[in-house]
Image (spheres, rainbow, N blue to C red):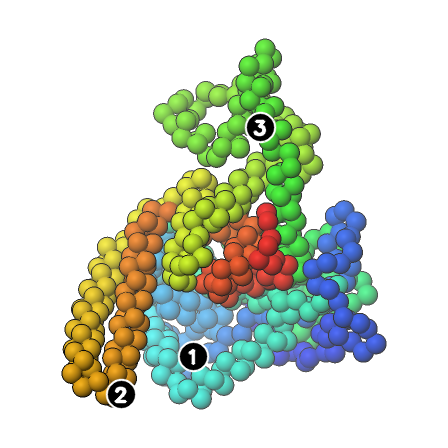
Amino acid sequence: MYRHLTSSLLGHRVCHPWLTPICLRPGLGSCSRWEEEKKEDGVKWTQLEHRGPYFAPLYEPLPDDVQFYYDGKPLKLSLASEEIATFYAKMLDHEYTTKETFQNNFFNDWRKEMTSKEQNIIKDLDKCDFREIHKYFVDKSEARKALSKEEKQKLKEEADKIQEEYGYCILDGHREKIGNFKTEPPGLFRGRGDHPKMGMLKRRIMPEDVTINCSKDSKIPEPPEGHKWKEVRFDNTVTWLASWTENIQNTLKYIMLNPSSKLKGEKDWQKYEVARRLKDVVHKIRAQYRADWKSKEMKKRQRAVALYFIDKVFKNLQLFMKNKDPGDDLFDRLNTSILNRHLQSLMDGLSAKVFRTYNASITLQEQLKALTNSEDNVAGKLLSYNRANRAVAILCNHQRSTPKTFEKSMQNLQMKIDAKKQQVEEAQQELKKAEEEFEDTKDAKAEANVEKKKKLLKRLEEQLAKLNVQATDKEENKQIALGTSKLNYLDPRISIAWCKKFGVPIEKIYNKTQREKFAWAIDMADEDFEF
């Protein structure tokens, strides 16, 4: 049952010219990435070519001098049994292997993969000794960390080569990055908390498990030699490239495009464009639902109140329901379908999430206008940005508990501030001394020394101001989760336009991954963009 892939699974294909985007091939002009002709409803792409998944590396047998012991005696395991034993051995120092559920699930699944001879011998997990195998992998990990700079660079180059070959696809003429192009390696399922399936065997994904999705006119990915795909589809109404069902939860896993891809970017863009359209009708909608609060028709009155909740942070509804009987209906003449139909009648594409996105984005834009001082330095402008973002997070009820490391982190920051204050005081004294010396001598060398001390003092004062801003920012944000709204509900063009207008580097707001995700917004937004 538990099979191993042949060596043909690794590096089974070489680079093909079809990985060159259509728009870069000879005889074809340049392509506009974001502004292209829209497709008919439901169609996501017209051309999709890719290499298929990169399969997890094959199992490498243990060296002869690394042994498994049962009841104190060395026991040579079959290849399949040995590989599964290594999964458990690697986790010996983890809390999971102390849990009875994990142990039982592992042992049951392991025995299923043993030979009949092994099953007759290995009957008690407590008599299994994995310590030598565990030490082998610990030593191997330490050796990897101790590699020279040149050796690490070589490994990086090998990984980059795999990324280059399997990590990109051609989508409608554009070379797009793939998010997760590797199949998950076999191992033991962990799960969250005390998951009842923890310790069960996650099987190796085979080509026969994988469904490929691409365009009919594309070069269909070739399976590894001696294998075949489960199925090849040509479904342009979905955005996944390959899929398979994992054996633990029986759920589908997908190879998807990277967040920076054109398709993902277009989806993001369209989401915020729908929210922007709400701006034109929101005053009319609000006036109507306020009027309906007094309606004689109870259904209409309930609908109006529900719409108010959606508009003014519907999460408060959860708060209102606390300590009430689960059977109590707050809106007994309303259901989600009725409300969604009403939202659609008010504006095409309108939903509770669109309201949330609109309110979050418009609040950020208004707060940035109110809080930003063009005379501030970058640190001061970032403080204003975070305060504007915090107003949105509060609106959206994005709270968090104070991080466990907060006090320690603040103490370390305060120590830096105190040390910087000391440096500023010393620099002030040195400047005063230099000025007195110049008063006495009036020579050029003393004058140059005064200028040097002034520059040093100014630099230290700026550094102190920056540290104080960090402390203020950290204190104000300790119970607010800024990331959720920034990545999901705020039109990134607002932040990018703000950066461009006030000379703040975009990387101060968005990290590399986020800049890739919002590449469409960086391309589109200038400093005059208005949500």
Label of residue 62 in the image = 1
Whether residue 403 appears in this view of the structure is no
Left or right? Give the position of 529 relative to 467.
right
Q: Quadrant of residue 438?
A: bottom left
Which residue is denoted by mark 3 in the rendering?
Answer: 286
Sequence order check, earlier mark of 3 and 1:
1
Quarter holding the N terminus is: bottom right
Whole-Å distance between the Cαs marked 1 and 2? Answer: 75 Å
User: Given this view, does label 2 or label 3 mark the residue nearer the observer?
Assistant: 2
Label 3, residues with CA under 10 Å away: few <14, some 14-19, many ≥20: some
Q: Amino acid at mark 1?
A: Leu
Residue closest to the eye, 197 or 390: 390
Whole-Å distance between the Cαs marked 3 and 1? Answer: 69 Å
Rendered residue at 66%/67% (across/down): 176
Label of residue 444 in the image = 2
Q: Is residue 194 above or below residue 444?
A: above
Left or right? Give the position of 295 relative to 138.
right
